[in-house]
Amino acid sequence: DLVYIGGYNGKVYVFNSSSLKMNDDYPPEGNLEPIVGGLVVALDQVYFGSSDGKVYALSIDPLEKKWDFQTGDKIWSTPVIDGDTLYIGSFDKKLYALSAADGMEKWEFETGGAIASTPLVYNNTVYVGSFDRYLYAVDAINGKQVWRFPAEDEADNRPENWFWTKPVAYNNTIYAGNLDGKLYILNAETGDEIVAAVDLESPISSWPVSVDDSIIVASEEGVLYAIDTDSNQKSELGNLEEEVFAALSASEEIVYIHTEKDALYAVDTQTGALRELYIE
């Protein structure tokens, strides 16, 4: 019955979900550096990264620091918890695996660029994009590279922009959006392209979501698409005519979209019916 929110002002807030009353905040005095990524609540703790380069773990109620871990640069990534391990990327070009219990480092994996995207953990593999324009698959246990997409070293074979968003996995397939406007469809084990990338003709900044047997993805210009996982063909669900940068969220067959104009929409993925939800 508690909701946790991190602010660009460097504060973490906890609200009662029924009364909307604020129960607590952290730190009690002063502020951290901006919190850009999301918060994760797991194992009776609240985890997040800060622009001060630290990963924090707080007790859930009251908000008190349990541990922190210093990386080499700011963090915009949202942490991911899988089992007893936390995975997070940093602008220091590294992907970290930490003990969720005490913050001790298990391993680190270095890429060729800053990491702002949020990792995906699937079948004991961590998938994450880097500002070096590669998407990496890393063994979740030992931190060794499994593959890198694209496999060729020549710059001409790489996407023209970054893998900014968190990928989504379905049926041993990785769907990864890129700021070049394409959704890349890869074999989860090998990193090979299953089919040619789906071109949405606008940058993909928001996280896709999986609904039934479709991948739902929004382009930055606000067009919502459904990608059929059998044929990997796209169909348009609707056009919000507002820019979309925030992650999509799905509940059953409804996808929720927060736009740049501070509107919240609900889209029925079966019918395409679109309604705007009120935000006070």
Image (cartoon, rainbow, N blue to C red):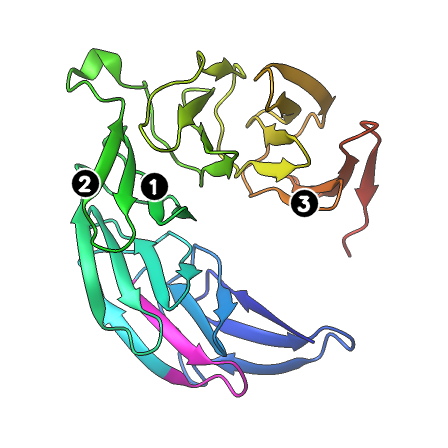
Q: Which residue is drawn at 50% across and 14% down?
A: 199
Q: Name the residue under label 2.
A: 111
Q: Which residue is drawn at 68% across and 16% down?
A: 235
Q: Crowdedness of circle 3 by 10 Å Cα count: few (<14), some, many (20+)?
A: some
Spatial CA distance of label 2 from label 3 is 31 Å
Marks 2,3: beta carbons within 8 A: no
Q: What residue type is labelled 3?
A: Ala
Q: Name the residue under label 1.
A: 128
Q: Is residue 53 visible in this depiction of the protein?
A: no
> Which mark sits nearer the N-terminus, 1 or 3?
1
> Which mark sits nearer the N-terminus, 2 or 3?
2
Was residue 118 drawn as part of the magenta stretch in this picture? no
Residue stretch rendered in magenta on the structure: 52-65
Numbered mark located on residue 208 in the image? none
Marks 1,2: beta carbons within 8 A: yes
Q: In which quarter of the image is residue 244?
A: top right
In the rendering, at what x and y percent does residue 115 appear? 29, 44
Q: Is residue 55 left or right of residue 27?
A: left
Identify the image quadrant of the N terminus. bottom right
Q: What residue type is labelled 1?
A: Val
> Camera-side residue: 45 or 115?
45
Identify the image quadrant of the C terminus. bottom right
Spatial CA distance of label 1 from label 2 is 10 Å
Q: Name the residue under label 3.
A: 250
